[in-house]
Amino acid sequence: MCGIVGYIGDGGARKIIIDGLKRLEYRGYDSAGIALLSEGRIKLRKAAGRIANLEKILENAPVDGHAGIGHTRWATHGAPSDENAHPHTNGDGSIAIVHNGIIENYQELKEWLVREHGITFRSETDSEVVAHLIGVFYKGNLLDAVYDAAAKMRGAYAISAVAAAEPDRIVALRKDAPLIAGIGDGCNFLASDIPALLKYVRTIYLIENNETVLVTQDGITIFNERREKVKRDVFHVSWDADAAEKDGYDHFMLKEIFEQPKGIFETLNRRLDADGRVRLDGISLTKQDLEKIDRVYIVACGTAYHAGLVGKYAIEKFVRIPVEVDVASEFRYREPFVNEKTLLICISQSGETLDTLAALREARAKGARILSVVNVVGSSVARESDDVFYTWAGPEIAVASTKAFTTQLACLYLIALYMGSATGVLPEGEYRRILDELNALPGKLEALLADERTIREVAKKIYKKEQIFFIGRGTDASVALEGSLKLKEISYINSFAIAAGELKHGTIALIEQDTLVVVLATQDRLFEKLLSNIEEVKARGAYVIALAKEGNRKIEKQADDVFYIPACADEVTPVLGVVPLQLLAYHIAKLRGCDIDKPKNLAKSVTVE
Ligand code: F6R
């Protein structure tokens, strides 16, 4: 996910493009850049970091123009750096492009450009290929060159290009990544998303897949794949800028909860080939490497730690190797048995959590091999690991982590499947069974999210409670911890999670009349045990909300309210089971009037010990 903005008019392009990029920072924020057309030249400024860094550069070395393109980046190929920031140019700087998405065959195209045209690349991005391709095909008509370049590229992307020799136009192309064009008065615009333009225009064209747009000061022309002009009705935007950024959701947290089907789909899709084998692409964990490993540690913090707890179940079950999971801040100080035979899996959304990073460094110094599960490309954890398994959640803005958790789970299942299959421990039939279950998850998540109303109704009954318990067994105990954390961090309710079997060893003393207990009973093999736990707490007067798998209706006789998740194998219930708990926390916090996206005392990235 990246953000693109383009403008062409009488002048002042710099301010308009920077304004637009700021409204798109939610799409990515690791570097930004701008290419301005002025006096027959392309003037480029770009910088790693937030848009504020780019603004500082523009203050020190001011440029402006009548037209230009800008970009805010969410790194996919190559770390966030000045060189990898967009716009990218061709060799002599006469063509500049910005790009959102992925050019799947960029390696092949890069080799061709080097071999046939002697081109030297300056960045590690797939995007730079686009600038050189357009440059190679450019014969005085940017539109022609963009069509010729697009014919060679595979992937899902949107690009926008300018040429120094044609300062009167911007050309853009959409292929499975969002693009809109805004109709101004004596000027026109391009952007990845509506919020970028709302300060300036409210009348736009929604560009469709495989369409190319030619934007001049006087007009916008849309062409289809066959280069025929397309007639498009205009779209009038009535929402305010804040609502548009959140795609109409009230909060980023809710938007991100609803993005989980896509996140899981992307995370699986990037790592599975057509035969359903896990593709390691760049990760060097061969059968020989795995044979040397006798122990796995998973270290992480908070939500990522809870994902690690589920990962332990998957790896121990599919690979039959001992796995220890530790919170990173503890791991460092307890002299763990780490050596060259250890595989350390670090899990981190931000990749910047200091505790996790310190644990990684500690283990590395003792010879462990480091495999990380990270969302932010080029982050410190990613850079310091031997191998990285990226989650494809896209930028997570809300402080409370949701889509990072479920995509971390997807990665851990894939790692476990790969290891189980490579070592020959996991029979092929089992591999296929789990793979089918994983591939069915995006659809099941969609179905689950469609029933949000039921959760909202239950939240209305309980939002005034000041204490809530979560209990579960097996992986449900790990999901209970995550449900409890979500609730406490955004609603400030005192919540507590415990393995259901452990309740009777002390904590049950706190259960009394009307105490609220959320019982996770999503696994068939443990279902009867949880029914007994419900009996235990009901006998002491508890109000029980249960989470169960569709079909296990017997639970309705005991629980006061029940949420169902779609039927699935016990191994993958955490991906579905956590969603009603995320929604429950969200709706309770909303009813309590809390600042959901920015809860008190918390930060999105914890870079202190
Ligand atoms: C909870 C939450 C935190 C993070 C933790 C680790 O919603 O977001 O518990 O999970 O601070 O952060 P990362 O994953 O960035 O290392």
Image (tube, rainbow, N blue to C red):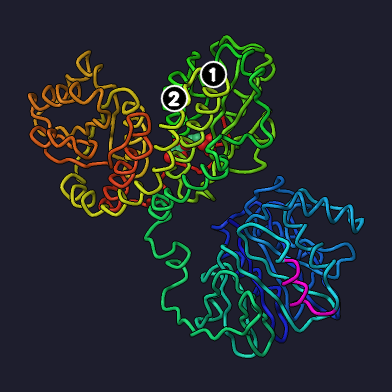
Q: Badge 2, how many Cα within 10 Å: few under 14, some, many 20+?
A: many
The answer to which quarter of the image holds residue 345 is: top right
Residue 201 in the image: above or below residue 22: below
Residue contact at pointers 2 and 1, CB within 8 angstroms: no
Residue 143 belongs to magenta span: yes
Q: What stretch of residues is rendered in magenta?
A: 140-149
What kind of element bears circle 2?
helix
Percent x, y for residue 460?
18, 51
Depth check: give the residue in front, 129 or 476: 129
Residue 235 in the image: above or below residue 302: below
Depth check: give the residue in front, 91 or 175: 175
Label ID, residue 356: none
Q: Which residue occupies 50% across, 26% down? A: 416
Percent x, y for residue 329?
52, 23
Label ID, residue 314: 2
What kind of element bears circle 1?
loop
- Left or right for 43, reference 23: right
- Left or right for 154, reference 245: right
Q: Badge 1, how many Cα within 10 Å: few under 14, some, many 20+?
A: few
Q: Amino acid at mark 1?
A: Gly
- Left or right for 528, reference 309: left
Label ID, residue 424: 1
Report if the beta carbon of the residue with label 2 is closer than 8 angstroms to ligand 1. Answer: no
Percent x, y for residue 500?
24, 22
Give the mark count.
2
Q: The N terminus appears in which quarter of the rendering?
A: bottom right
Q: Which residue occupies 21% across, 48% down? A: 459
